Image (cartoon, rainbow, N blue to C red):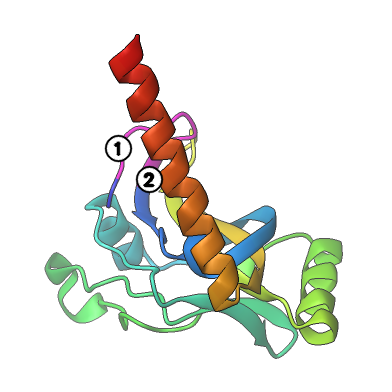
Amino acid sequence: MVKKDTPTGRTVAQNRRARYDYSIEDTIEAGLVLTGSEVKSLRQSQASINEAYAGSDQGMLTLFNANIPEFFQAGRFNHEPKRPRRLLVHRRERDRLLGLIQREGMTLVPLSLYFNARGIAKLQLGLAKGKRKSDKRETEKKRDWQRDKARIMRDRG
């Protein structure tokens, strides 16, 4: 699902499944190191972060398995669609996140990929813990009840 023109800019891709599979403890905004053809492909709203995750690669924070398809007009100057991409965060934040991943078994899950108000590509990461099956059922029950409650209130009023 792609949203256009959100308050922070223009959303390119969202990972809607992440909030169902994980309980999000904290969110972080990170920059991305991209090539020109990747930015042009993102401007056409062509990206998928559904199976992506962030982790450590030689002490740096890196985004793995994010799919940004080739920009066909780039010709021979194109990029590899699923290459690992470096994430740009402050050193203290990077060290804190990598420590939480290693010590407490948390996961960095990309939640959305967007362009900010200045036109720079940003990635919203969620510091997450995996949900058990019972937690997922509980979340689904709450969501269904909220939907039914809204429907009842709408019919009465």
- Where are the magenta residues, as a range? 3-11
The residue type indicated by label 2 comes to: Thr
The answer to whether residue 37 shows anywhere in this view is yes
**Label 1 crowding class (10 Å Cα cut-off): few <14, some 14-19, many 20+?**
few
The answer to whether residue 121 shows anywhere in this view is no
**Percent position (x, y) of residue 78?**
25, 77
Q: Which mark is residue 90?
A: none
Dot placed on the residue nearer the N-terminal end, 1 or 2: 1
133 sits to left or right of 67: right
Q: Which residue is mark 1?
A: 4
Considering only vertical position in the picture, is 119 above or below 123? above
**Percent position (x, y) of residue 135?**
59, 67
Quarter holding the C terminus?
top left
Q: Which residue is mark 2?
A: 11
Considering only vertical position in the picture, is 112 above or below 94? above
- Tell which of 8 and 106 is nearer to you: 106
In magenta segment, residue 10: yes
**Label 2 crowding class (10 Å Cα cut-off): few <14, some 14-19, many 20+?**
many
Q: Classify mark 1: helix, strand or loop.
A: loop
